[in-house]
Image (cartoon, rainbow, N blue to C red):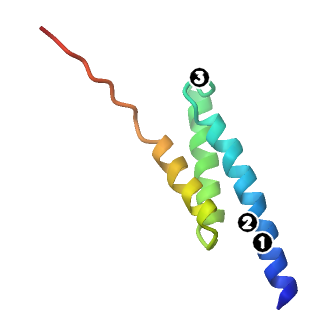
Amino acid sequence: MEQIARIDTALDELLVGLGGMVLRLAHPQVTRTREEREALVRSVNQFSTCAARSRDPRVQQLNDKLRDSLKPRLRLVASR
C-alpha cells in the first residue's frame, strides 16, 4: 500500500508540473493561431482526463484554471 501511495504522490507532482506548462501555453501571447488554440484545447482535455481521479487540490485547481482558459475572452466595447 505504501508503494501505491508513493506512486500516487509522484503522479500528482507530474500533473502539477504538466498543468503549469499547459497553463503557460494558455496565455494569449503564446497561443495566437487557430492551430495553436486547437492544440491547447487537446492538451487541456488530456490534462482534465488525467486529473479527474486526482485528490490533490493543486491538480484540481490547475484543472479549473485550464478549463477557464478555454472560455472565450469577452471585451467590453463602449459606444457613444
Task: State left or right for residue 67 relative to residue 59.
Answer: left
Residue type beneath disc 3: Gln
Residue type beneath disc 2: Asp
Q: Which tag, 3 or 2, sits closer to the chain's start?
A: 2
At 59% from the left edge and 66% from the top edge, which residue is drawn? 57
Viewer-nearest residue: 5 or 66? 5
Query: Residue 43 at what x, y percent from top left?
Result: 64, 47
Badge number at residue 9: 1
Q: CA distance from mark 1 to mark 3?
A: 33 Å
Above/below status of 61 relative to 31: below
Which residue is the site of mark 3?
29
Q: CA distance from mark 3 to mark 2?
A: 28 Å
Q: Quarter of the image containing the N terminus? A: bottom right
Local packing at callout 2 (Cα closer than 10 Å; few below 14, some 14-19, many 20+) is: many
Residue type beneath disc 1: Thr
Q: Secondary structure at mark 3?
A: loop
Q: Secondary structure at mark 1?
A: helix
Above/below status of 39 relative to 47: above
Local packing at callout 1 (Cα closer than 10 Å; few below 14, some 14-19, many 20+) is: some
User: Quarter of the image holding residue 71?
Assistant: top left
At 61% from the left edge and 40% from the top edge, which residue is drawn? 40
Q: Residue furthest front?
A: 57
Badge number at residue 62: none
Which residue is the site of mark 2?
12
Local packing at callout 3 (Cα closer than 10 Å; few below 14, some 14-19, many 20+) is: few
